[in-house]
Amino acid sequence: MGLLGALVSTNQPAAVSNLVEQTTGISVAAVKTKDPVERDYLALMAMDDKAREEIDKWIRDADAFADKGAGSPQATLNLKIEQRLDEVKKAYEDFIDRHPKHARARLAYGSFLNDNRDDFGAKVQWEKSRELDPSNPAAWNNLANYYGHRSPVKKAFEYYTKAIELEPNEPVYYQNFATTVYLFRKDAMEVYNLSEAEVFDKALGLYRQAMKLAPNDFILASDYAQSFYGPRPPRWEEALKAWEQVLPLAENSIARDGILIHLARCKINTGKFDEARKDLSAITNQTYMELKGRLTRKLEDLEKGKPNTDDDGPEEEKK
């Protein structure tokens, strides 16, 4: 995670999606350098990575033991994790004390703090990293994420724009920007002097740019498709086309059934009743049985000429 934060940065703002995973494709062990500072920095990144791997394993093992009715108390596991993270935190602080102008170390330390719920501490490190190396787009993106969470949102717009200017081929920057514009529509309307409909179009355009750069990203494509539920009335035809593009990206039956729910919803709202029924009949996962039932009842009512506005879109869009 330390190396990841230093090179790409993927911490998402409050958004449609839960998580966007990015990989750098770079192995710390494979990097050779004669620079002693750089060697220390790479060792620090490797330490961070190893700690995260260990903690992930501890959590998985604890869950497996708990399923069998065994395992250590949660408080014991939490203390073990806290102690391991404290070791990494001290290593970061020691390195930065010795090399206070090392921009990438501060960027990585900010990501470490952010992952451990120290948002303000992360922001301080990212700001310093940006000051030391304003050409690094990850620092601008991370700070934009922070301001998307904490405000001022207008500053998030500015910083995402700068990140994209510095690295126009990184899809996660466009996706973060799109999500923030979509969620904070009133701010976007004021900043860009746009109508709400035009703000939706701006967000969708940013999503499309991200998808050009990452055409096989399931979560990104899903975020884009869900965005058509935001306008009032929702853009059902466009949403339908978008979900049809997401379907081939589903990696398992749970994801497939989730997409079929969306497809059925869109088809019901565009009068494609027979196609909607076919999609609903293909849904078998228990996770979606309640939604399947609601959509089935809506379909039956509409076929009988009865009004039914139940489940016109995902719950988050009704709030």
Image (cartoon, rainbow, N blue to C red):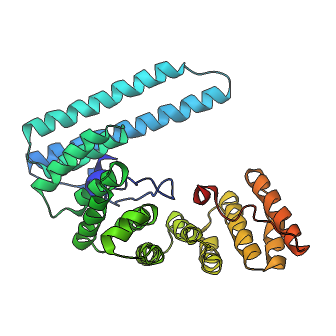
Residue nearer the viewer, 35 or 93: 93
Q: Quadrant of the C terminus?
A: bottom right
Q: Is residue 315 above or below residue 75?
A: below
Q: Nearer the viewer, residue 187 or 216?
A: 187
Which of the pair 99/129 is nearer the observer?
129
Which residue appears at 18% of the width and 54% of the height?
32
Please indicate whether residue 154 sits to the left or right of residue 69 in the image.
Answer: left
The x, y position of residue 73, in whole percent, is: 54, 18
Q: Position of residue 146 (x, y in %)?
A: 31, 51
The percent coordinates of residue 155 (x first, y second) are: 26, 59
Q: Mark yes or no: residue 219 visible.
A: yes
Which residue is found at the position 59% from the left and 32% from the top?
63
From this view, report whether residue 133 is shown above or below residue 249.
above
The extreme right residue here reads 304
Direction from residue 151 to residue 180 in the image, left or right: right
- Residue 131, image quadrant: bottom left
Residue 176 in view, yes or no: no
Counting labels gives 0
Residue shown at the point (67%, 22%) measured from the top left: 69
Picture coordinates of residue 145, whole percent (x, y):
33, 55
Q: Using the rendered view, name the quadrant where residue 95 is placed.
A: top left
The correct choice, above or below, for 272 with respect to 119 in the image is below
The residue sitting at 22% across, 70% down in the picture is 166
Residue 119 quadrant? top left
Which of 15 and 216 lies nearest the eye of the viewer?
15
Left or right: 170 with respect to 227? left
